[in-house]
Amino acid sequence: MGGARTLVIGIVNVTPDSFSDGGRWLDPAAAIGHARQLMAEGAGMVDVGAESTRPGFEPTPADEQLRRLLDVLPGLRDAGVPFSVDTRSAAVAQAAVAAGACMVNDVSGGTHDPEMLSLVAGLGVDYVCQLWGRDAQIPVRDQLVARLDACLGAGIEREHIVLDPGLGFGQDPQDDWRALANIDDVTKLGQRVLVGASRKRFLATPGDDAGMREDAGVAVSAWCAQQGVWAVRTHTVAAHRRAIDVISRLMESRAQGDSDK
């Protein structure tokens, strides 16, 4: 499978309670510095969020999300760092795009805020439509087709829609593995696909630690590169970028060999 190399999107959480790095980047200068470091390691952009959606999370009001974000986003824009905003709130999305965001990453896929889809359609930016609470009885592909239809029906242009299977938001870790194993069912829809597996619980095995889960995430990124996934969303970048580059070189070499036959 040819095409552009899978993009790595670095995660910048300006939250006190995210499951992996809550509180580390609350200070605007620290968040901006971290984003620049992720870019230096090979990220194509960063995804900035001010609401944790970890298991058992408490919703963060839009005004609090904005308080956390609006000292960070202009600094990213001024530093030339391309960024998306991770939010379920239309008001937050609108303010973030005004501050320079090129993409809205909505983990609820437009089901949380009834104004989100029409707002994004009017803004004309990219929109990540993620499955929220997958139904294990319905194929992931079919659930994403339903959300794709909702986005199109709201007026979002097809080329702006990115589909995300919502790893970590199902009921059973095995469902996440099945969704990932069959991610080509989603890429075959012809839309860009984003996978966010970094440090999520389904990667864990008994007795592992955060480092082992990180290693598993790098393997997932390599798998995604083989399956034509547009982008992976990760807490760290360098190892994921290297793994994707190796897979891409192997695939390019094989394609060249086939063309020489």
Image (cartoon, rainbow, N blue to C red):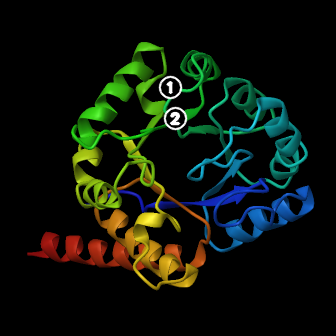
Q: In this view, does 125 lie to the left or right of 59?
A: left
Crowd class of label 2 (few under 14; some 14 to 19; many from 20; radius 10 Å): many
Callout 2: helix, strand or loop?
Answer: loop
Residue 179 locus on image (x, y percent): 29, 53
- Residues at badges 1 and 2 in contact (C-beta under 8 Å)? yes
Say left or right for 197 vs 90. Answer: left
Q: Which mark is residue 108?
A: 2
Which residue position holds label 1? 111
Residue 8 seen anywhere in this rendered image of the structure: yes
Q: Is mark 1 on a helix, strand or loop?
A: loop
Q: In the figure, residue 16 lies in which quadrant?
A: bottom right
Q: Name the amino acid, label 2.
A: Ser
Q: Residue at x 48, y 32 (%)?
A: 109
Reply above or below: 119 against 138.
Answer: above
The answer to whether 229 appears left or right of 33 in the picture is left
Q: Is residue 242 visible?
A: no
Query: Residue drawn at (78%, 53%), measured in percent from left and top?
Result: 14
Name the outermost residue toward the left.
261
Image side of residue 4 versus residue 50, left or right: left
Crowding at label 1, few (<14), some or many (≥20) Cα neighbours within 10 Å? some
Query: In this picture, is 74 found above or below 209?
Result: above
